[in-house]
Image (cartoon, rainbow, N blue to C red):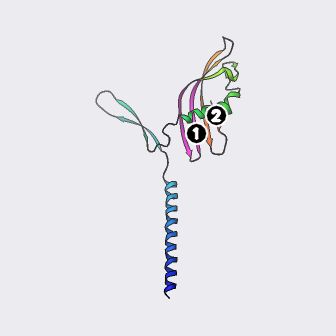
Amino acid sequence: MKGGLKHNTMKNDTNLYLIGIIALIVGALLTYGLFPRTEFVDKTVIKEVEGPIKYVNQTTINEVIIEDASFLLTNAIKDAWDRELSDNEKFLTCGTTEYDEDEVVLSKVKTWGYHWIDDDEYNVGYQARFKYDSSNDDDRCTKTWNVLVHYEDGEKPKVSFR
């Protein structure tokens, strides 16, 4: 009888360990799924004060994933040029002149940002000024484009511009 009790106790201990491990795994998965990784809140706070009104723009970042996200912009510029812009007739046309890809240069990124859609999907958008300059001195032009690059794991980036 003693041997039977010992075996039954070991079986109960094993079951308790398995239940504990399963509970830890389920708890970790629920925590990962329920709590967002990033949340950006842009809000304008207007306070009434005596004298002139002061406007304060305040951005609250609840969690920072990437300390320096500039590599996202660098990758988006490269991917947009390689995948779409360098051979797109609409993009290579400024005014009434169509330029070759080596005659177009990105001169300035005015604004840019990124937005995480899901764990494996995000967008990088930027507004940039491009200079068009051909070998003919009369053919110079500057144009500003809004470019959006959509990334999803396992797929090629998708580029749109206007």
- Mark 2, secondary structure of its residue: helix
- Say which quarter of the image contains residue 72: top right
Foreground residue among 145 and 116: 116
Q: Residue 129's x, y, as percent? A: 58, 24
- Mark 1, secondary structure of its residue: strand
Q: Main SS type for the magenta part?
A: strand
Question: Residue 79 shows which numbered tag?
Answer: 2
> Comparing marks 1 and 2, which lies closer to the viewer?
2
- Say which quarter of the image contains residue 114: top right
Residue at the spot 52% in from the left edge and 81% down from the top edge = 7
Question: Residue 46 shows which numbered tag?
Answer: none
Q: Residue 149's x, y, as percent? A: 61, 36
Magenta part of the protein: which range?
107-130
Residue at the spot 48% in from the left edge and 39% down from the top edge = 67
Identify residue type, mark 2: Asp
Q: Which residue is mark 1?
A: 123
Foreground residue among 107 and 67: 67
Mark 1 burial class by Cα count in 10 Å: few <14, some 14-19, many 20+: some
Q: Residue 161's x, y, as percent? A: 63, 31
Residue 43 painted magenta: no
Residue 119 painted magenta: yes
